[in-house]
Amino acid sequence: MDENNTTTGEPVSASTPQDPTTAAPQNALNREDTPDGENGRPPDLFTANQETALPLDSFAAIMTSEDGDDDDSLSGMSASGWAIPWSDLMMTMFVLFAVMLSYNMSERDLKDALLKSETTRVQHLSIPKIDGPVFNYLAPEQILEISRSTVKDANIENIDVIMDTNKAVHVNVRGEMLFDIGKAELREDTKGFLKKMSAILSKIKNEVHIVGHTDSFPIHSEAFPTNWELSTARASKIARFLIEQGSLDPARFTVIGNSMYRPSVPNSTPENKQKNRRVEIIITPDIFNGIPGGEK
């Protein structure tokens, strides 16, 4: 049975095959008019744009291309697909190295700043020829040399610095340099020297003995009934001054008063008596560790 063509008006035979290019629009229109659920498919699967729709033969041609062409296409797609992840990886590594470099430089700058601050703090201390941190141990020969250098810089007479057989350094201050006769008050012109000695003691941890001596002239006063009290009071005065000036641990100190009974020379002349009126600052080889007579 023949029907009229709705677009050209020409009769079309039912047995005549239709051109796919002309039949597709009509089929699309017919499918658009078909209610949902008819023909067994959802209506949105048939609403293709007729201007962009490709014939089935074109898709078949793509799927049936030669094997060599497929490999080239896949290899090209693989290279382009790795480009973005690879660039992301490179950027991540660059950022990581940049952060590590910045951290290293910052840590180095911090160490330099701390070192400079510590150097500046040490330079501000009025300690002649003694810089740096507190030493847990200095050889007796080093302590002897430092003490002699301090005495020399102070330009003060009547001071002897020696080391005995037990490796203890003795700083002997003789005569009326520290005290007036019969008194236990420090003279102002000797406090500068004692401050320098306190600075030396603040750099080491050795135990210190302060020993006071008098000559053979007996004293009888309200403040000092005997030479024992006078020698002990003088040693105590020096120990307190050193501790206060250097913020030293008092437990490191031992104060001794020997009265007139340990003369360095016979008390036969006024000159010898002046030598016997003395105070010794003895830096022992013992390192104070909380217990007197500690490590050596």
Image: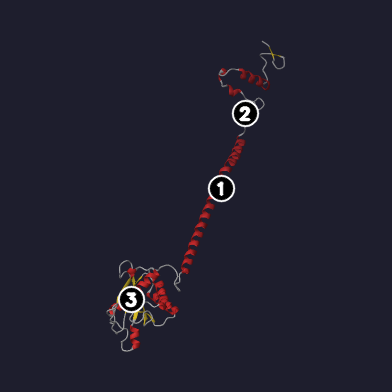
Of the 4 image quadrants, the one containing the C terminus is bottom left
Residue shown at the point (49%, 66%) measured from the top left: 120
According to the image, label 1 marks what residue? 91
Residue linked to disc 3: 235
- Are there few (<14), some (14-19), or many (20+) residues within 10 Å of tag 3? many
Give the mark, 1 or 2, whose residue is nearer the N terminus: 2
Label 1: few (<14), some or many (≥20) within 10 Å?
A: few
Q: Label 2, label 3: how many angstroms apart (C-alpha)?
A: 113 Å
* Secondary structure at numbered mark 3: helix
Query: Looking at the image, which is closer to me, 215 or 208?
Result: 215
In x, y percent, where is residue 9? 72, 14
Check disc 1 and report its element: helix, strand or loop: helix
Q: How many marks?
A: 3
Asked if the residues shown at circle 1 and circle 2 are in contact, with their CB atoms under 8 angstroms apart, the answer is no
Mark 3 is on which residue type? Ala
Instruction: Give how far across and how far down residue 161 sits, in percent.
Output: 38, 80
Indicate the quadrant containing the N terminus: top left, top right, bottom left or bottom right.
Answer: top right
Q: Nearer the viewer, residue 62 or 260?
A: 260
When the figure is inspected, residue 140 is found, relative to residue 113, above or below; the finding is below
* Residue holding disc 2: 59
Q: For residue 283, say whether it is visible.
A: no
Sequence-wise, the earlier of marks 3 and 1 is 1
Asked whether disc 3 touches disc 1, contact meaning CB atoms under 8 Å apart, the reply is no
For label 2, the SS is helix
The answer to whether one can see residue 140 in this image is: yes
Asked whether, in this view, residue 148 is left or right of residue 75, the answer is left
> Mark 2: which amino acid?
Phe
The label nearer to you, 1 versus 2, is 1
Q: Earlier in the sequence, mark 2 or mark 3?
A: 2
Counting from the top left corner in percent of width and height, residue 183 is at 34, 79
Q: Nearer the viewer, residue 132 or 223?
A: 223
